[in-house]
Amino acid sequence: MTAMKKTVVCAAAALACSAVLADEIRNYRAEAVAMMKRDFKTRGIATADRVHEDGLQAVCNRTSDNPPKDIAARLERDQLEAVKYPTDGKLMGDWKAGEKLAQSGRGMTWSDKAGVPGGGNCYNCHQISPTETSFGTIGPSLYQFGKIRGNTPEMQKYAYGKIWNAKAFNLCSAMPRFGHAGALTESQIKDLVALLLDPQSPVNSK
Amino acid sequence: MKQRLSTLMVAAVMTASFAAHAQQPAKKAPPPAKAAAPAKKEGITAEFEKFREVLEEDNPAELFEAKGEDIWKNKKGPGGATMAQCDLGLGAGVVKGAYVQMPRWFADVGQVMDAERRIVHCMVKYLGYKEEDIRKQPFSNDQRTPDHVSVITYVAAQSRNLKIAAPQKHAKEIEAYRIGKEIFAYRAGPYDFSCATCHGDDGKRIRTQDLPNLRKPAEAVKAYQGWPGYRMTGGFMLTQQWRMNDCFRQQRFPEPTYLSDSITALLAYMTVTANGQVYKGPGIKR
């Protein structure tokens, strides 16, 4: 364990300790989690262990998605270090495949089948291509994403990393960690990067 | 019945024309990045609200209300027991206003129960329904609407236009609310979602579906209002327990056990948040 990682663990523990001091919160939180562990059952691919929070979720849960800045910065760095970039160095795939993927809201529910590739769920929360008017507003509009930012190697790397693990940039972001969670494959993420950054993509049309 | 059928057909035609209408904007020229989108959305919502108002004049949920009323008033269990013996919190057999005053503490079972849980409890206890059968198919599908769903619809309709007033007197009622509040905010699973991810802010939506901020009374009532609800797609009644179940599915969680403490707690949180708002009765959903 590196010195930096140790610091992070201690910082996270201190955070948990300060939450413990607020007696009421501790009791009801703990009871809620114990109750859910009792009541939620495996169905299909949605296994019962999913109600157990992981380390990052625990920090966000205990701080109402608002962790102290220095802790957030350290944990974001850890998340970013764990992003797996494609070994061939190519980050942009096919924007047309990306558009199809962005449309699909499937993946990882108990009604999804094991082994079937999931969707990007993108339009659920974001405006993307101007031709799709049925889009959600939980996330920001991504229309003109590449037009505004260009598609330099750095921008491609940012977009790939953001989709792979949104929490590497905003620790308690509402956006899933698609690569980290195994919800999207490397080639799927490449296609989504292309949807955002390819000059031919309708996202960047005038 | 003839009149009823014609009403349903009108409803079906309206649903179809609404669906057609809803798809139209997609063919139009792409809107500029931001400004045009919310306006279009409001257009669809307003259009649907109009249909809903017309439908609520003669709500298809009434069919299920009638069936539920018949079961409540006339069905006899082993030994001649009836639902007149069922105490929904306001005394044996009292239905008026009971729905909007649950979840509540029930001393006879030593539990806080939401409306659906209590009604199923009574149907098992007095009418001889088997709990394992109800658990086999707790929710309606296009093949079958279980009897308890009709009874829930009847009981809910008897609280129409009454103020939501889930009690917070008994320590266990307060506990259920507090635990429900924690469940609401609890992020977990492969997508890191909690209820609050979608329902914790104002003015958000998934695709074109509005997401009420369930932390606010005037918004929480929007979610409460719709259930039990007649779903036009499919033409059957769905309950609050179904709504919670399907939210957790989309949250990528494992499945909550039907009528479990977790769901009762979550409903306690949501209902108490909506306290003081007027319940308009079984709803209609797209």
Image (cartoon, rainbow, N blue to C red):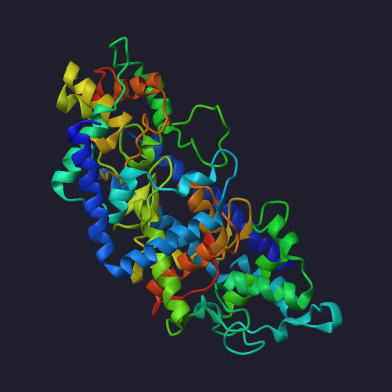
Of A158 and A132, nearer the camera is A158
**B133 and A98: which is toward the camera:** B133
Percent coordinates x, y for residue A157 in the rendering: 23, 21
Which residue is nearer to you in this view: A56 or B70? Answer: A56
Q: How many marks?
A: 0
Q: Position of residue B77 (x, y in %)?
A: 81, 77
Establish if B125 lies above or below B183: below
Q: Position of residue B224 (x, y in %)?
A: 46, 67
Residue B266, horizontal then vertical, whole percent: 46, 65
- Kindly identify the residue that appears in the image at 68 percent across and 83 percent down: B86
**Relative horizontal placement of residue A85, taking residue B268 as reference (left or right):** left
Residue A109, above or below A186: below
Taking the view exactly as shown, the residue that stands out farthest to the top is A88
Above or below A170: residue B166: below
Q: Residue at x 65, y 60 (%)?
A: B8
Any part of residue B165 in sight: no
Viewer-side residue, B257 vs A22: A22
Q: Residue at x 32, y 66 (%)?
A: A25
Q: Is residue B272 left or right of residue B57?
A: left
Q: Quadrant of residue A80?
A: top left
Can you see residue B73? Answer: yes
Residue at x 77% of width, y 69% of height: B129
Q: Quadrant of the N terminus of chain B?
A: bottom right
In the rendered image, the residue lying farthest to the right is B79
- With A159 as the anchor, is B97 left or right in this view? right
